[in-house]
């Protein structure tokens, strides 16, 4: 089964509020509904992925140590992965049960404009 397209997802939402379907989300001469959907798509998608825990959007990666940030009250600081929307668990490589995460805290470094773990 093919994944639903952006247009089919938008049309499903428009159907629920009794609005006419759209044909495309890009190009010129878009309907007001298509313009609104195109503007909202990225933030709505990111919010949906953050709220749920979809298996297709879950990855286990090794974190890279952050070289220039000195953490307060922690032994290590790691770079936040660039493609990560929401960090769910952090665990060390020796953990046999990856569902058991370690304590971690996300911080923001205003000097470098980075999220850090």
Image (cartoon, grey):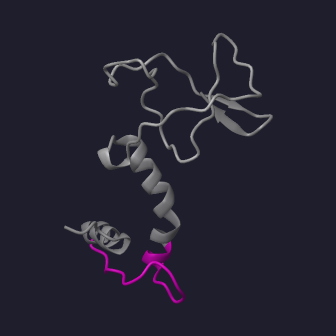
* Residue 32 is inside the magenta segment: yes
In the displayed structure, does residue 74 sit left or right of residue 14?
right
Please provide percent x and percent y for residue 107: 64, 27
Please provide percent x and percent y for residue 98: 34, 25
The quarter of the picture where the C terminus appears is top right
Q: Magenta region, mostly helix, strand or loop? A: loop
Task: Report the span colored magenta.
Answer: 18-35
Which of these two is toward me, 105 or 27? Answer: 105
Look at 52% across and 85% down and name the residue there.
Answer: 27
Please provide percent x and percent y for residue 22: 36, 81
Asked if residue 5 is positioned above or below residue 106 in the image, the reply reads: below
Q: Farthest residue in the right direction?
A: 111
Q: Farthest residue in the bottom direction?
A: 29
Look at 46% across and 51% down and name the residue there.
Answer: 46
Please provide percent x and percent y for residue 26: 50, 80
* Residue 62 is inside the magenta segment: no
Which of these two is toward me, 35 or 19? Answer: 35
In the displayed structure, does residue 85 sit left or right of residue 23?
right
Look at 27% across and 73% down and name the residue there.
Answer: 18
**Residue 54's image quarter?**
top left
């Amino acid at each position: 089964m093919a994944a639903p397209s952006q247009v089919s997802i938008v049309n499903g939402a428009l159907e629920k509020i009794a609005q006419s379907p759209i044909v495309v989300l890009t190009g010129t001469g878009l309907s007001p509904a298509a313009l609104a959907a195109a503007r909202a798509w990225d933030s709505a998608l990111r919010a949906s992925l953050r709220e749920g825990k979809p298996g297709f959007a879950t990855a286990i990666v090794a974190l890279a140590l952050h070289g220039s940030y000195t953490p307060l009250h922690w032994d290590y600081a790691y770079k936040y992965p660039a493609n990560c929307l929401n960090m769910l668990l952090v665990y060390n490589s020796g953990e046999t049960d990856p569902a058991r995460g370690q304590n971690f805290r996300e911080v923001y470094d205003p000097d470098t404009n980075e999220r850090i773990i």
